[in-house]
Image (tube, helix red, strand yellow):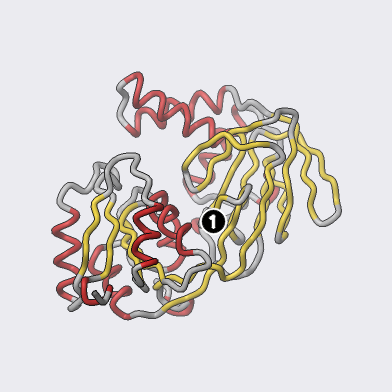
Amino acid sequence: MDPAAAGIPVFLNVRSGPEGVRDGGALIAAAFEKQGLPTRLIALAPEQDISSLVDGLLDAGSGTIVAAGGDGTINAVAARLLGRDATLGIVPMGTLNHFARDLGIPLELEGAVAVIAAGQARQVDVGEVNDKPFLNNSSIGMYPRIVSEREHAQHHLGAGKWPALALATWHALRHPGSFNATVQVDGRRIERRTPFIFVGNNCYVLEGFGIGRRTCLDGGVLALYVLRPKSTFGLLWLGLRALLGIGSHAKDFDAIESASFEVQGHHSEVEVATDGEVAETAMPVRYRIRPRALKVLAPSPKEKR
């Protein structure tokens, strides 16, 4: 059977978004039907490994695969498309939707499906940490601790997502847990004591209301940001300024652009966050950029909203 005739495969994470998307399948099917595109909805069970499902579709000849969910779902699908003759479509249904937002994909359903129907593909960079791909960013230190403690509060204390996040963030700010890190980059050895190392797939805006966004996803560089040591009050003030879009944060970080580097610490393993998912990773932590490794359906940069 022609894969196109069977419909575009759409992986749907029904638990994405602030409260989950319980009727997401019907809404997505209707939006694709409005554009004249048949679909095959594949609902993902919690914690399901979708690698073999995506590989099976690629082996059967599917040329476009859509991920409907948050950044974690999109990352999981995209990881299997690298090095394959296939294109990623995105229906952003998560809480933050960083990758879709930076690509200029509309965050509302019908607009996102219209982008898929238009069929305009772009090639964008993908970062890797110890061979694991990421589309947005990776980090070591305070942020992975916040994610781990938030999940603990949700699963073991019964806290809701946002109360759990607030509790985990407050705990991390009170006990930032600075660590010694050595960065090997472009023949240089940089030693720092820091609570937080952040690595972006391309460069992030560090000032004003654009903070946390990227204007380019095909610049061929990783952006390394090493936070300078701060007190609890300094971290709170940094977070407040970021939330309100006040001023510049360039002086808060040592910032380096490179195609690859590695981070070494005093432990054999370290918690590393990759597009919001946390896992223990062996030291040293090696980063590299894969230029234009992913083909994705998105507006051209000049058409970004």
Image x and y of residue 275, in percent: 49, 48
Q: Give the residue at x 41% y 71%.
A: 87
Q: Nearer the viewer, residue 294 or 138?
A: 294
| For residue 47, above or below residue 203 | above
In the depicted view, which residue is nearer to us: 14 or 174? Answer: 14
Residue 164: x and y in percent read 38, 28
Picture quarter containing residue 231?
Answer: top right
Q: Which residue is mark 1?
A: 208
Quadrant where the C terminus sits is: bottom left
Q: Is residue 227 left or right of residue 37?
A: right
164 to the left or right of 208: left
Which residue is pictured at 31% across the width and 62% down the height?
91
Residue 205 visible in the shown view: no
| Secondary structure state at the residue bearing disc 1 | helix
Label 1 neighbour load within 10 Å: few <14, some 14-19, many 20+: some
| Residue 134 shows in this picture | yes
From what the image shows, is residue 245 above or below residue 147? below
The quarter of the image holding the N terminus is bottom left
Q: In the rendered structure, which amino acid carries the disc numbered 1?
A: Gly
- The mark total stands at 1
Name the one closer to the observer, 276 or 83: 83
> Residue 172, how many percent across, how many down?
54, 27
Q: Is residue 161 left or right of residue 210?
A: left
- Please give the name of the residue rendered at 58% of the width and 55% of the height, measured from the top-left corner: 207
The image shows residue 39 at horizontal and vertical percentages of 21, 68
